[in-house]
Image (cartoon, rainbow, N blue to C red):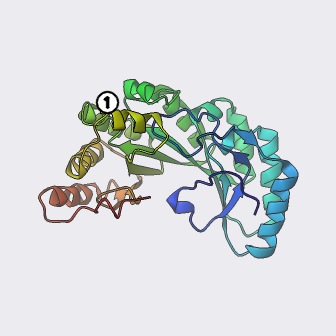
Amino acid sequence: MQYEGNIIRPPSEADSILLQVTVGCSHNGCAFCGAYAGERFRVKDEATIFADVEFAARHMSGLRRVFLCDGDAMAAPRAFLERVLQRVRERLPRVARIAAYASAKSLRAKSPDDLRRLRALGLSMLYTGLESGDDALLARMGKGTGVADMLAQADKVRRAGMKLSATVIVGLAGTVGWERHARLTGEALSAMAPDHAAALTLMPVPGTSLWDDWEAGRFTLPDGPAMVRELRLLLEHTTLRQGLFLADHASNHVPLTLRLPRDKAHGLAVLDAALEGLGALKSERARRL
């Protein structure tokens, strides 16, 4: 496979064929993200992608999932994505699920019919970064969109018959405004109603503007117990009719895999026990990415 730059995938795509169709992220302006620093977003050459599909057909034909890399594959033109999906269908007939990252910006540029056409060709799951339900915090972090827009795009995804996974970030508000961030994020997740909700815990990344603020003392990173309190408040305000709530990323102090609404009380109890000292928090060494 011919990869360029950083290849980032969700934890749940560990067993997927990683097919890179774009390089970098179409926004690449979030204060907390250094994954694509210095990368100029572009769509990869079709011939290169098709050669990678042929490689996968020869060496990975038994795998049943494909993840379209990189940071915002949905920013590629619909017709281009259709050709890629068609080639995957032809050369990897055992693949049962194709997924990709998608931003509100890239989804806004796709019509409902665009999404339905891509769904018909096998694109069945999208991952998006909600990050926070607090519009003011999103603006400070350079997210480039607001909660209402992200909810509207999520609704469009669902209406197209696709599943949706939404990521949020515990600790993003620092030690000031964390309660508002947790509460509004839980409420936004509830309104978005994703099939999967994934909570990551903030770890400042060198080279980002948030790292610079942390180093200069303009941003105070909550400690482990404070992060767990925030996660608890976020979960308390999250109401999903059905779906997974995950805090199983390497960054999290207390790992959780919950099916809501069934496991919500259990999840809150686990976090309460950790805060009362009845369960050890993951060490900072163990949280290194």
The x, y position of residue 185, in whole percent, is 35, 37
Q: Quadrant of residue 7?
A: bottom right
260 vs 155: above or below:
below
In the rendered image, the quadrant that contains the N terminus is bottom right
In the rendered image, the quadrant that contains the C terminus is bottom left
Quick one: 286 or 86, which is closer to the camera?
A: 286
Q: Residue at x 63, y 42 (%)?
A: 72
Q: Residue at x 39, y 50 (%)?
A: 200
| Numbered marks: total | 1
125 vs 181: above or below:
below
Quick one: 237 or 202, which is closer to the camera?
A: 202
Please give left or right for residue 224 compared with residue 32 in the image: left
* Residue underneath mark 1: 218
Q: Indicate the amino acid at tag 1.
A: Arg
Please give left or right for residue 214 compared with residue 236 in the image: right
Q: Residue at x 49, y 33 (%)?
A: 151
Tell me if mark 1 has few (under 14), some (14-19) or many (20+) residues whose alpha carbon lies within 10 angstroms of its own: few
Q: Residue at x 30, y 58 (%)?
A: 253
